[in-house]
Amino acid sequence: MTSAAADWSVYDRPELRDSVSAMAGDGLREVLLGIDGMHCASCAASIERALAPLAAQVQIDVAARTAQLRFDPRQSSLSALLGAIEAAGFKPRVFAQDASLNRDRRAAREELARIGVAVLCAMQVMMLAWPTYGREASGIMAPMLALLRWTQWLLATPGVLYAGWPFFVHAARSLRARRVDMDVPIAVSLAIAYGVSAWRVLAGGGELYFDSATMFVMLLSGARWLEGRSRGVATGHLRRLLGARKLTATRVGAAGDETVALAQIARDDILRIAPGEAVPVDGRLLDDDAELDEALLSGEARPVQRHAGATLLAGSLNVGATAIRVRAEALGHDTWLAQITAVLNRAARERPPFQQTLDRIAGVFSLLILGLAALTAALWWPLSPEHALSAALAVLVASCPCALSLAGPLAFAAGSGRLARLGVLVARPRVLGRLAAVDTVIFDKTGTLTRMQPVVEDTELLGGARAGDSAARCLAIAAALERPFTHPIALAFRAYDRQLPVAALHSVAGRGISGRVEDVAYSIGADDGMLAPLADPAATAIVLRRDGRPLARFALRAPAREDAVAAVAALREQGCDVQLLTGDAEAPARALAQAVGIDHLRARMSPQGKLAHLRQLQGTGHVVMAVGDGINDAPLLAGADVACAMPQGAALAQAQADLLLVGDSLRPLTAAPALARVIRRRIVQNIAWALAYNAFVLPLAMGGVLLPWMAALGMSLSSLLVVLNALRLPRVEG
């Protein structure tokens, strides 16, 4: 390396600086760094001393080996901060930032501050209110009693108006949108409790509800913080993926290596990835071997070996002992990591129909609570206005529909997070409901039950061959026709590509590809059954035609995935009927089906034929999950109750995919239906609990048995129980 400024100066470019840091107010920027080599408090102290002249604020987490810095870009550059850390003997790593996640972090810090105020105020108000309860108040001198009441008001004000302010804001937003949600009864109860108590302090008499109001804010804020924390844990895979995005790369050039921003990388650039660094873009390995950690992408905990010519995915880590070279192929939003992140972001924004129904029920329930509270007050008022207010507050607080609204989202988030860690991404949360009812699983053959990339085992010249035609030339023509495509058969020919000129390419799903190579019309596709069978029944025949006449036949063979037998057996143990539908010939399809344990198979099926078979199954009441590579199987995936795409690049482009396998294994797929059934049970349990709880406490609250502070405690415990139950998922292995 050269000087620190030269090494890190790339981060001073506005476009890169803005992508790795966020505005934090007062002109300061905030950046999160990983610190390699930091092991103890002494290391942290050294870093703090090095940064003290440059950063306005330094927060170091030794356990996580991170440093969160706030700095003034007008006085200190980001490269200077990074250089200072390196000069202190540590290696900084700049984490990719996301605007929404930065907002979430700031909101979480503010929420914790409000909870702290709520706890402090609630404890002090309870302590001051205790002597004024019942007969004890009669023994207190009037000046002292007045002092206690005024002090309660003083302490309750920040506890309600600051700590509880989000409830008022959300309630006002709901009312402006002409709807009533759970925050409306909360805000109404807080406003009544605080307003009536303040008026009674001024009037010099009457029961105060400051203790109930502050306790309500404390308990409900704490429960919501736990719920938000649980969501964060459940969706942590998305955060780790966002943090894994590489922002710079080392480009190999004629003048030597240079560090450049990711936006400056072009296709076919040669990049060098040092040991411990992440691969910045999808690319092809140029060295003989590489050892990579792909845990974030596939869930595979052990490092995997890749060899020359293999595709390396952005986000995987070089855990080998030496640097590796990669030729850039997919950049920016086209990388596998970017597409996974986009899928997870889309899933996080989507609200399943089931949850939308629950939200509507919660809104109706909120209106019902307001009506019952008014009815309770009206019924008690002739007997005791004091008790009427207490009972109405208890109804508002005890029956808050928080538990009902939390019943579904947390279970969905926890289940999606667990599946993501196993290697299954939930692209559409609504699919979890259908996944729990799956009783039939349809597999494609090539690239699904077999290894993604078959190999050409044999080339046979046919009757259409002429003098000058050879096996090598036929392979080169086939490679030219398949060049733009990424499906498994196309990849099998890639090694034979001689860059012959090709034009007028046309692809028909299930039929093959036609085009002009060196101005001659060729087509390539599956054997139509008119030729003699291949000697190897497990091989697949692909025929190259010139001007419609068979020119050559290629025997392709893709071995079954090592875990295909176990995956099929696991699905059958769950009661699923497993079927194989393929456009391949009968012999190789039957050989594979027997090898992996599938009894029901159909060969030589067009995409439309697969879809017709699917409709027939659905017409007899079956719930079907289809698993394919997302290319020729697009109609099947679109029509299936649950569509699962394999981890080829084209599969991510299929809008029909509900689930995405991100690893090179079928094992995680077998855990998905079982986990979906558990999630469904948790949701039903949570709804049943929420309804039973409200059916129990409503009569008690309306009858005046529950005091407001008791109602607040019960409501918070009910919500907490729902949160814990939603997160209580079994440890399934993929």
Image (spheres, rainbow, N blue to C red):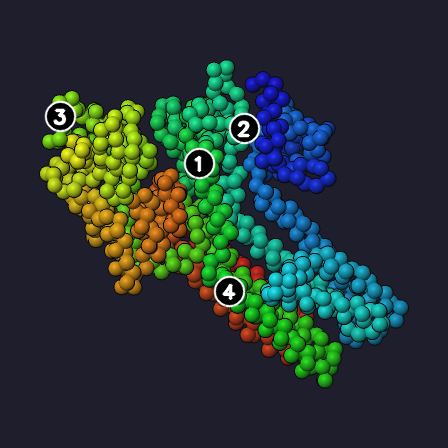
Q: Nearer the viewer, mark 4 or mark 3?
A: 3
Q: What label sits on residue 358 in the rendered view?
A: 4
Residue corresponding to mark 1: 335
Q: Nearer the viewer, mark 3 or mark 2?
A: 3
Q: Earlier in the sequence, mark 1 or mark 4?
A: 1
User: Label 2 neighbourhood size at 10 Å, few (<14), some (14-19), many (20+)?
Assistant: some
For the point 42% across and 25% down, the residue is 268
For the point 55% across and 36% down, the residue is 96
For the point 43% across and 49% down, the residue is 427
* 49 to the left or right of 37: right
Q: CA distance from mark 1 to mark 4?
A: 37 Å
Residue corresponding to mark 2: 261
- Amino acid marked by disc 1: Thr
Q: Nearer the viewer, mark 1 or mark 4?
A: 1
Q: Position of residue 363 (x, y in %)?
A: 57, 67
* 661 to the left or right of 517: right
Q: CA distance from mark 2 to mark 1?
A: 16 Å
- Amino acid marked by disc 4: Leu
